[in-house]
Image (tube, helix red, strand yellow):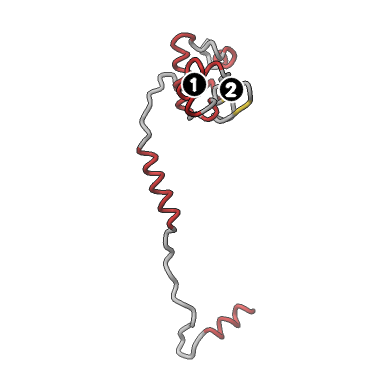
């Protein structure tokens, strides 16, 4: 009821309202900045070949609910103990911290390094569940 009364009061005898004309929404500077940052960030990504991608995805599906899990003494989606990244992901460990802070690709690349000498043995139960042992 109040809205109807306000509408009647705002209409001038000529049929024009006193309300300003609608203005088209403008993008906020923050949105523009985020878009530019996102595009610039994507430009630094490169395609990485992970030979055993399906196998690591299967192991991950049985090891952890996310790639970011930190459940000491195990970290990341492949549940690496601290000795694992020291041996196979030293650069990531120094720059990123424990495996739960690495990207899934970084975790799988460290696992690929281990696979070259150890196969899927570091994940005996889940590798067996995936038919890899």
Question: Which of the labelled discs sits on residue 2, or is there none?
Answer: none
Q: Badge 1, how many Cα within 10 Å: few under 14, some, many 20+? A: many
Q: Earlier in the sequence, mark 2 or mark 1?
A: 1
Q: Is residue 35 left or right of residue 72?
A: left
Q: In this view, which residue lies farthest toward the front?
A: 94
Q: Secondary structure at mark 1?
A: helix
Q: In this view, which residue lies farthest toward the bottom?
A: 13
Q: Badge 2, how many Cα within 10 Å: few under 14, some, many 20+? A: some
Q: Count up the numbered dots.
A: 2
Q: Secondary structure at mark 2?
A: helix
The residue identified by callout 2 is 63
Q: Is residue 49 left or right of residue 63?
A: left
Q: Quadrant of the N terminus?
A: bottom right
**Residue at 57 percent of width and 19 percent of height:** 82
Q: Position of residue 92 (x, y in %)?
A: 47, 25
**Residue at 46 percent of width and 86 percent of height:** 15
**Residue at 44 percent of width and 21 percent of height:** 109
Q: Is residue 79 left or right of residue 54?
A: right
Vertical order, 121 against 45 (above or below): above
For the residues marked 2 and 1, what is the alpha-carbon distance in whole angstroms?
A: 10 Å
Vertical order, 36 against 88 (above or below): below
Q: In this view of the protein, which residue sits in the foreground, 106 or 20?
A: 106
The residue identified by callout 1 is 56
* Tags 2 and 1 touching, CB below 8 Å: no
Q: Position of residue 90 (x, y in %)?
A: 47, 20
Q: Position of residue 118 (x, y in %)?
A: 49, 9
Q: Position of residue 80 (x, y in %)?
A: 56, 20
């Amino acid at each position: 009821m109040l809205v109807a009364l306000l509408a009647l009061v705002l209409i001038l005898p000529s049929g024009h309202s006193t309300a300003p004309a609608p203005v088209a929404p403008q993008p906020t500077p923050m949105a523009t900045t985020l878009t530019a940052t996102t595009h610039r960030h994507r430009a630094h990504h490169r395609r990485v070949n992970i030979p055993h991608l399906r196998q690591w995805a299967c192991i991950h599906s049985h090891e952890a609910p996310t790639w970011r899990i930190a459940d000491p003494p195990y970290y990341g989606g492949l549940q690496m103990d601290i000795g694992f990244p020291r041996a196979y992901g030293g650069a990531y460990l120094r720059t990123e911290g424990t495996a739960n802070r690495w990207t899934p690709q970084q975790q799988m690349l460290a696992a690929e390094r281990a696979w070259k000498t150890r196969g899927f043995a570091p994940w005996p139960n889940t590798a067996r569940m995936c038919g890899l042992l």
